[in-house]
Image (cartoon, rainbow, N blue to C red):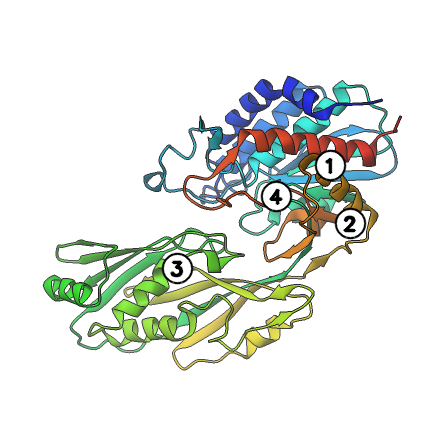
């Protein structure tokens, strides 16, 4: 059977876009509205129900697993090929977007919406790849299962629960990263720095609260501090030190907001951390002792240092690159005596970062290790990697870019033998986790064709 996969995808274009827009319209970030029916929130549950409804509509085997994950299965055979995607998203602030993040629209050939690139668009491309193969009447030699999670952005609890009762695929891929192939993922550890509060003192400025960050795995783009003091003196300091991008709200309590630039937590060097930037400025003020200790720690050990050198945690090797550290969430509340920095680190397999974290000691900060995950690596020479790479090269003509190792963690590590495969092309802007996230329509269609031929080569009888 000779199949022109690009032509077949074009036949499904309108339906693919309609289904994708339905899915993108669901605000599916984890929002705290937990229940037995929606363990990770109502939005993620609605998104799971929506994508599973497509499978039911099209007549495939569908299963909801504990309201946190599910699958759509087709094919036959002993071996199980898995494609793992997710429909949860990171939060989005509509004020930072040109169009509403959950009202998808196409402008200049691009689909703008939260999750279109990470990971609803790629997941729907994979679904339509499987769907068009089945409609073509291919002979399956393996079972193919699209597994959909709802907690990838927070902690993989969805797939942890899924694989407690469900079969683990023998091989597969996750469409949740970059082309050509990510065959290695760094280990991950999350930990926090917690201020040791001291007895309050008198000061020119007293910090009451501070908030920055939407998730551990995002570089904070905005920080707001509430403090008491003379607002005119604060403004003078801002002018003296040349800070321009700030906002002050006067009143009994002064609100000071700084802006930065968001980026994915696995590549913090691509962003500007608004909170650490603010810390540098705050130290020019006469602060109360707790605020001073909090900001001194941030400025001394965290500011402008995504590789952990100031903490003594810097590491790099030739196989997996350097360790990275994203300081994603900042919380300060004087009344509740909370002064916290939540950190997301990615590091090579050979680096024993957990022990290093547990050995950290500071006079005014307590360090708490929260979670850690091992690294994942599939050799470039493996047949799975070579097959996927061959299809990618056929459709793109790209013979330059090779399989790579990243700091991001994907569902690939949840299967016996799997890689991350697409969908961001090497020359495209990465807007995952950022305001105005987008994906080119042509890239969505190209990815669908690449996935379809890849699955055809691995899971179907040839000829």
- The answer to whether 235 is drawn above or below residue 140 in the figure is below
Of pointers 2 and 3, the one earlier in the residue sequence: 3
> Which residue is the site of mark 3?
273
Using the numbered discs, state the Cα–Cα distance from disc 1 to disc 4 in whole angstroms: 21 Å
Badge 2 density bin: few <14, some 14–19, many ≥20, Cα 10 Å:
many
Which is more foreground, mark 3 or mark 1? 1
Whether residue 48 is visible: no
Left or right, 399 with respect to 303, comes to: right
Using the numbered discs, state the Cα–Cα distance from disc 3 to disc 4 in whole angstroms: 24 Å
Task: Tell me which residue sits at (35%, 58%) in the image.
Answer: 274
Find numbered disc 1 in the image and state the secondary structure of the residue it sits on.
Answer: helix
The disc label shown at residue 417, or none: 2
- The answer to whether 316 is drawn above or below residue 458 in the figure is below
For the residues labelled 2 and 3, say whether their Cβ atoms are less than 8 Å apart: no
Find numbered disc 2 in the image and state the secondary structure of the residue it sits on.
Answer: loop
Left or right, 48 with respect to 301, comes to: right
Using the numbered discs, state the Cα–Cα distance from disc 2 to disc 1 in whole angstroms: 23 Å
Which is more foreground, mark 2 or mark 1? 1
Badge 4 density bin: few <14, some 14–19, many ≥20, Cα 10 Å:
many
The disc label shown at residue 394, or none: 1
Q: Position of residue 165 (x, y in %)?
A: 74, 43
The image quadrant that residue 371 belongs to is: bottom right
Q: Position of residue 247 (x, y in %)?
A: 22, 53
Of pointers 3 and 4, the one earlier in the residue sequence: 4
Left or right, 348 with respect to 358, comes to: right
Using the numbered discs, state the Cα–Cα distance from disc 4 to disc 2 in whole angstroms: 16 Å
For the residues labelled 3 and 1, say whether their Cβ atoms are less than 8 Å apart: no
The image quadrant that residue 250 belongs to is: bottom left
Badge 1 density bin: few <14, some 14–19, many ≥20, Cα 10 Å:
few
> Which residue is the site of mark 4?
176
The image quadrant that residue 66 belongs to is: top right
Whether residue 83 is visible: yes
């Amino acid at each position: 059977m000779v199949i022109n996969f690009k032509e077949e995808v074009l036949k499904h274009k309108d339906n693919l876009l309609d289904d994708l827009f339905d899915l993108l319209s669901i605000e599916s970030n984890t929002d705290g509205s937990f229940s037995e029916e929606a363990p990770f929130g109502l939005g993620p549950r609605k998104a799971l129900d929506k994508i599973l409804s497509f499978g039911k509509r099209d007549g495939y085997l569908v299963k909801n697993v504990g309201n946190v994950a599910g699958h759509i299965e087709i094919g036959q055979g002993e071996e199980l090929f898995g494609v793992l995607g997710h429909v949860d998203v990171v939060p989005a602030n509509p004020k930072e977007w040109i169009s509403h993040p959950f009202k998808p629209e196409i402008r200049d050939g691009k689909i703008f919406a939260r999750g279109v690139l990470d990971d609803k668009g790629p997941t729907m491309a994979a679904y339509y790849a499987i769907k068009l193969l089945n409609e073509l009447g291919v002979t399956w030699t393996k079972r193919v299962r699209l597994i959909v999670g709802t907690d990838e952005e927070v902690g993989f609890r969805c797939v942890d629960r899924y694989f407690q009762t469900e079969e683990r695929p023998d091989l597969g891929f996750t469409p949740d990263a970059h082309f050509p192939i990510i065959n290695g993922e760094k280990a991950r550890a999350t930990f926090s720095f917690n201020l040791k509060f001291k007895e309050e003192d008198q000061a020119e400025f007293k910090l009451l609260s501070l908030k920055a960050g939407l998730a551990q795995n995002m570089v904070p783009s905005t920080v707001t501090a509430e403090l008491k003091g003379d607002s005119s003196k604060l403004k003078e300091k801002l002018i003296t030190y040349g800070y321009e991008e700030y906002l002050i709200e006067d009143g009994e309590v002064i609100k000071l907001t700084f802006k930065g630039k968001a980026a994915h937590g696995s590549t913090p060097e691509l962003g500007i951390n608004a909170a650490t930037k603010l810390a540098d400025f705050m130290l020019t003020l006469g602060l109360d002792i707790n605020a001073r200790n909090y900001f001194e720690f941030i400025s001394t050990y965290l500011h402008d240092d995504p590789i952990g050198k100031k903490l003594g945690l810097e590491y790099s090797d030739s196989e997996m690159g350097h360790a990275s550290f994203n300081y994603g969430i900042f919380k300060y509340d004087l009344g509740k005596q909370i002064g916290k920095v939540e950190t997301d680190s990615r590091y090579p397999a050979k680096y024993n970062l957990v022990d290093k974290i547990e050995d950290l000691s500071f006079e005014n900060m307590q360090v708490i290790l929260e979670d850690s995950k091992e690294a994942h690596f599939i050799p470039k020479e493996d047949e799975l990697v070579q097959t996927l790479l061959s299809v990618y090269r056929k459709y793109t003509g790209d013979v330059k870019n090779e399989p790579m190792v990243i700091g991001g963690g994907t569902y690939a590590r949840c299967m016996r033998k799997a890689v991350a495969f697409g969908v961001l092309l090497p020359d495209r802007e990465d807007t995952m986790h950022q305001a105005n996230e987008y994906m080119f329509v042509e890239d969505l269609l190209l990815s669908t064709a690449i996935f379809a031929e890849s699955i055809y080569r691995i899971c179907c009888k040839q000829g």
